[in-house]
Amino acid sequence: MNCPFCEYKNSKVLDSRSSSEGRVIRRRRECLSCKRRFTTKEFVEEVPLVVIKDDNRREVFDREKIRFGLLLACKKRSVSAERIESLVDKIELQIRDAHQYEVMTTDIGKMVMDELREIDEIAYVRFASVYRKFQDKEEFINELRGLEN
């Protein structure tokens, strides 16, 4: 690691700390030449996930889209922002743990619905109505009946 002040090539690590659930390591370093201190961060380099849309277009996975959908479904419900954030984390982790670099939007939607069903039934139905593109009240009623079972 080159010193940002004098460009000397060697430094010693004074302190290391893990943050962001172990995804980032922060290291406090001291240059062996000029004795100045600086901080570096190490990140795990992850292979980007690709999402396959219904029309077979591909785009980079964006967790913000999941968060936005959950926020809409949970609007005016008693689901905390922390709960939503942990849900987004859980879904992203499930996708990454599958060790697939491409995932269908339908699979992501199913994961979200499975989680929402356990958290808040109203939010679940809201999300399902958009995800499944209900065309009439019968589809909506059938989904509600499915919740009763």
Image (spheres, rainbow, N blue to C red):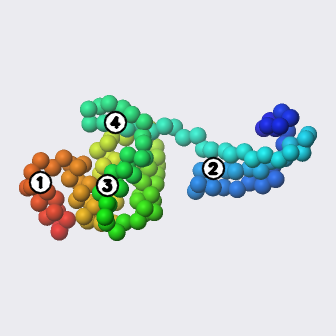
The Cα atoms of the two marked residues, 2 and 4, are separated by 29 Å
Q: Nearer the viewer, residue 102 or 88?
A: 88
Name the mark on residue 52: 4
Residue behind mark 2: 24
Give SS at disc 4.
Answer: strand
Q: Amino acid at mark 4?
A: Ile
Q: Residue at x 11, y 60 (%)?
A: 141
Name the image quarter holding the C terminus.
bottom left
Mark 2 surroundings: few (<14), some (14-19) or many (≥20) residues within 10 A = some
**Comes first in the chain, label 4 or label 3:** 4
The Cα atoms of the two marked residues, 4 and 1, are separated by 26 Å
Q: Is residue 20 left or right of residue 35?
A: left
Residue behind mark 1: 139
**Comes first in the chain, label 3 or label 1:** 3
Name the mark on residue 72: 3
Give SS at disc 2.
Answer: strand
Name the image quarter holding the N terminus.
top right
- Are the residues flagged by discs 3 and 2 in contact, CB closer than 8 Å? no
